[in-house]
Image (cartoon, coloured by chain):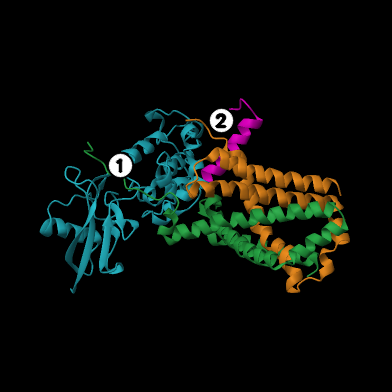
Chain colours: A cyan, B green, C orange
Amino acid sequence: MSERQVELEILRYDPDKDREPRFQAYRVPCPEDWVVLDAINYVKDRLDRTLSYRWSCHMAVCGSCGMMINGEPKLSCKTFLRDQPDRIRIEPLASFPIERDLVVVMGDFMNKLGRVKPYLVPAEKKAVEDGSYLQSPGQLKKFKQYTLCINCALCYAACPQYALNPGFIGPAALALAHRYNSDSRDVGRTARADVVASNEGIWECSFVGACSEVCPEHVDPAAAIQQTKIASTIDYFKDLLLPGRKG
Amino acid sequence: MSAKPYIRPRSTTGWWLEQSRYVRYMAREASCIFIGAYAGILAVGLLRLSQGAEAWAGFLEALQSSASIVFHLLALVFALYHTTTWFNVTPKAMPLQIGDARLPGEAIIAAHYAGWALVSAALLYLAGV
Amino acid sequence: MTRSHKPIVWSLFAAGGTYAAFFAPVLILVTGLAVTLGLLPADALSYERILGFARHPIGKAFLFFTVFLLAWHSAHRLRITAHDFGLRADGLVMAACYGLAALGSVVAAVALLRM
């Protein structure tokens, strides 16, 4: 297998020593089937043991290895070196504070996922003995794609509104809310609306669509948000014109 | 525990220049300047129309000026960009599902273009083209 | 967190955007370019012809809603764009954008009612 000399320019940051981040270059001989994560692992194994970064499954299902690769939010395990130029700029995920090197502080993202009530609020409370909830293939199809999120936060890195306003609930959280709102077993839309239909929720979104473009699982959070805008608008006017109606 | 998290500065005015997808987004958003100005021109036109034949003639003459032509050409380009970007995202905002099959987005978009062509042809015909 | 009141302006934005997508290009062509380009004879926009259209109830409604929808769609988008360019004074931007749209709508309405 032929090897190619690739130069990685990695943004380093040591909170104990550095006042601000700085780039450090590494030359890595790469087999042609490698992904960027393989090259980073080579750096850590052979060149610089101090490099810190997150990764786990190496197959684009865990969502750990998100980072900026030549300015684009990507999973490093899903970014093939054959599609990249010889010099690759690697930075931590945009719009998140840097913890150390390529590790970002994910607290805000995790917090927002929790705030949209990401659990089933069932229409009918069923005891286990009464059997399972029934759902047709058509009902499943309505929300299936929004279940595929691997919480990699690439969408937050791509979203300019999140960059401009970190209070924005964000694409993944809103797509997650939509997953439950679209589930035929769920009646939690009104309960979720306080967060979802707030100014920091769907209404901060201006439909740039970058989130859906970078999503490695094709969840399409932009679509989820636009559909929620329409549903919320209908709810709003229903509440206005028919006060006291049941949600 | 974060020892000293570093928050990277980001330009609030120039962020959109960093990526081509952001530039295209801004171009789409900028269409509102031209469509809004056009609405203003229409409002002024209606005002002149209500003020009589002479006022209307003055308005028509202003429409023929080179500044007006340049504006309307740009407005047409941006309006068309608005049309394509609006139609392209319609399947995302309003997906159509019948049973357990979702209508392909291309079909929804094609139907919109067909409607647009019909409306445009009808208006052109009514205007006298 | 409280529910936003954005749905009010957003529904105008969405309605106006849909209307603009279908009607704006041909309207711009007909009113602003067709005569100069020779697609339309000059008398297609004559005072008598257009006044007749504006006096007809359908024409009146069409003309008003064209100005109204295009104005409110543009106003809301301009507000968002101002935010995208870093202008943070949303109250001021709102007043300016929606104020302009309201002005255009009122001018159109008054003019049409006087014809």
Residue denoted by label 1 = A106
The 10 Å Cα crowd at callout 1, few under 14, some 14 to 19, many 20 or more, is: some
User: Dividing the image into 4 quarters, which one contains the N terminus of chain A?
Assistant: bottom left
**Eyeballing the image, is A198 above or below C24?**
above
Looking at the picture, which amino acid does disc 2 mark?
Gly
Of helix, strand and loop, which one carries label 2?
loop
Residue denoted by label 2 = A247
**Residue plotted at (61% across, 27% down):** A245
Q: Going from the N terminus, do you reach mark 2 or mark 1 first?
A: 1
- The answer to whether mark 2 and mark 1 are in CB contact below 8 A is no
> Is C25 on the left-hand or right-hand side of A168?
right
User: Dividing the image into 4 quarters, which one contains the C terminus of chain A?
Assistant: top right
Instruction: Count every numbered label the image shows and give the total.
Output: 2
**Residue plotted at (26% across, 41% down):** B5
**Residue plotted at (29% across, 67% down):** A84
- The chain containing the residue under callout 2 comes to A
**Residue plotted at (84% across, 45% down):** C113
Q: What's drawn in magenta, residue-wise? A: A227-247
> Is C27 on the left-hand or right-hand side of C115?
left
Out of A201 and A233, give the one closest to the viewer.
A201
**Eyeballing the image, is C105 above or below B123?**
above
The 10 Å Cα crowd at callout 2, few under 14, some 14 to 19, many 20 or more, is: few
Residue A40, by quadrant, is: bottom left
Looking at the picture, which amino acid does disc 1 mark?
Met
- The chain containing the residue under callout 1 comes to A
**Eyeballing the image, is A51 above or below A8?**
above
| Cα–Cα span, label 2 and label 1 | 34 Å
Residue A70: percent from the left, percent from the top? Answer: 31, 61
